[in-house]
Amino acid sequence: MPPSLADGEEHRVRFDEPSGRWFKATHPETYGAAPQISYDLDPETNRPAKRLVMGKGTPMIYLERWSLFNAVFGDDVRLERILPVGYGLSILVSQRDITGEAPALDEIAAFFHERDFMPVPASQDAFYRAADDVLALDAHQANLVRTDDGLVPIDIPVFRPDEDISRWLRGVGL
């Protein structure tokens, strides 16, 4: 695929008029990010502190996150194919076209609150729902669309926290 203005850090993106779907091909050997706990020094106290950060994703994590995205948000992202590209693999998914505008930050917060998600401390775009142990990340204005029917997520990475992240979430009161 040649470069386009819709390309991002994770995908090359093209719209297919006949199908009305967006096709997203991961850059070779780039499968998004995956949450992990970072152990850093707190600059104010100079004591160890844990925080949620994004590490490197794997092909399996990438595919699981889209499956979970479909289940949590009712979308129909489809795995189209896995392609050998030069030195690696690219995963091609497609998603229905959703037209609208970028929502305001308070609309995003309300959207997640209405669905029983709690904001993750020290993060402006991460939300957690304890009822089904779902962590939604990267929930910023470019990854949701305001439509006439309300907000629609278009690219929210969704994960089941591992035990380390689960302990951290419980420790911060979630």
Image (spheres, rainbow, N blue to C red):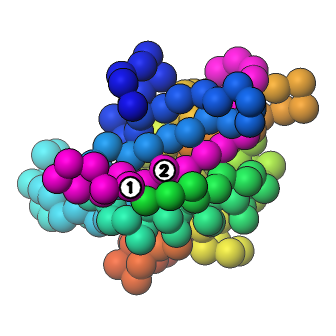
Depth check, front residue: 152 or 43: 152
Residue 130: say if magenta. Answer: no
Residue 43 in view (yes/no) = yes
Give SS at disc 2.
Answer: strand
Q: Quadrant of residue 12?
A: top left
Q: Name the residue carrying label 1.
A: 83
Disc number placed over residue 62 in the picture, else none: none
Question: Relative to 167, is 148 above or below?
Answer: above
In the rendering, at what x and y percent does residue 161 appear?
A: 47, 73
Residue found at the far left of this picture: 46
Q: Residue at x 23, y 56 (%)?
A: 88
In the rendering, at what x and y percent does residue 89 appear?
A: 30, 57
**Amino acid type of disc 2?**
Leu
Depth check, front residue: 82 or 119: 82
**Amino acid type of disc 1?**
Leu
The magenta stretch is 83-103
Depth check, front residue: 115 or 50: 115
Labels 2 and 1: the sequence-earlier one: 1
In the rendering, at what x and y percent does residue 165 appear?
A: 39, 72
Task: Answer whether labels 2 and 1 touch (C-beta < 8 Å).
Answer: yes
Is 35 positioned to the left or the right of 159 in the image? left
Q: Name the residue carrying label 2.
A: 92
Give SS at disc 1.
Answer: strand
Q: Quadrant of residue 154?
A: top right
Residue 89: say if magenta. Answer: yes
Measure the alpha-carbon separation of dots 2 and 1.
7 Å
